[in-house]
Amino acid sequence: MDSAYDAKIIRQQCAKRGHEAIIKPIKRKRRQPMAGADELTAEEKERFKRRTVVEQMNARLKDEFGGSIIYVRGAAKVMTHLMFGILALTVDQLLLQRTG
């Protein structure tokens, strides 16, 4: 499923906006790899690791700490709901590190 992220059009749109796409190149069986997207540099690998950590945190917030189900209205209430989720996620992560 992630192979769609490694598309030429996405890289072009990011470059047009002055952004650098941090997309891990997908090894394709039938097609040649895109030019310039064969392998990540050391700097890109480090940024990719950071992006992965952020995505994992967002996934845990949504799946385990109420980030996907919000029953309140208003920006302040939604923000409070999400911040309680982030607080619980932080405590959970600290406890995992302490016991692990």
Image (cartoon, helix red, strand yellow):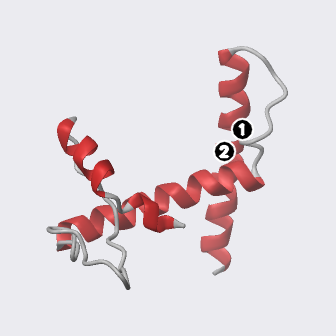
Residue displayed at 70% across by 25% down: 78
Above or below: residue 86 compared with residue 32: above
CA gap, disc 1 and disc 2: 5 Å
**Of helix, strand and loop, which one carries label 1?**
helix
Q: In which quadrant will I find the N terminus?
A: bottom right
Residue 95, image quadrant: bottom right
Q: Secondary structure at mark 2?
A: helix
Few, some or many C-alpha atoms within 10 Å of disc 1 (few <14, some 14-19, many ≥20)? some
User: What is the x, y in percent for residue 16?
Assistant: 19, 38
Q: Are marks 1 and 2 in contact (CB under 8 Å)?
A: yes
Give percent across and percent down for residue 72: 81, 22
Which mark, by number, is residue 87? 2
Q: Position of residue 69 (x, y in %)?
A: 80, 38
Instruction: Report the amino acid beneath label 2.
Output: Leu
Tell me where residue 22 sits by quadrant: bottom left
User: In this orientation, does residue 18 appear?
Assistant: no
Nearer the observer, 82 or 51: 51
Question: Eyeballing the image, is 66 above or below 57?
Answer: above
| Quadrant of res 42 | bottom left
Which residue extends farthest front?
30
Q: Quadrant of the C terminus?
A: bottom right
Task: Determine the residue positioned at 64% across, 44% down.
Answer: 86
Q: Residue 84 shows which numbered tag?
A: 1
Viewer-nearest residue: 90 or 76: 76
**Residue at 23%, 65% in the rendered image:** 44
Label 2: few (<14), some (14–19) or many (≥20) C-alpha neighbours in 10 Å: few
The amino acid on which the numbered mark 1 sits, given as a three-letter code, is Phe
Give the numbered dot on residue 36: none
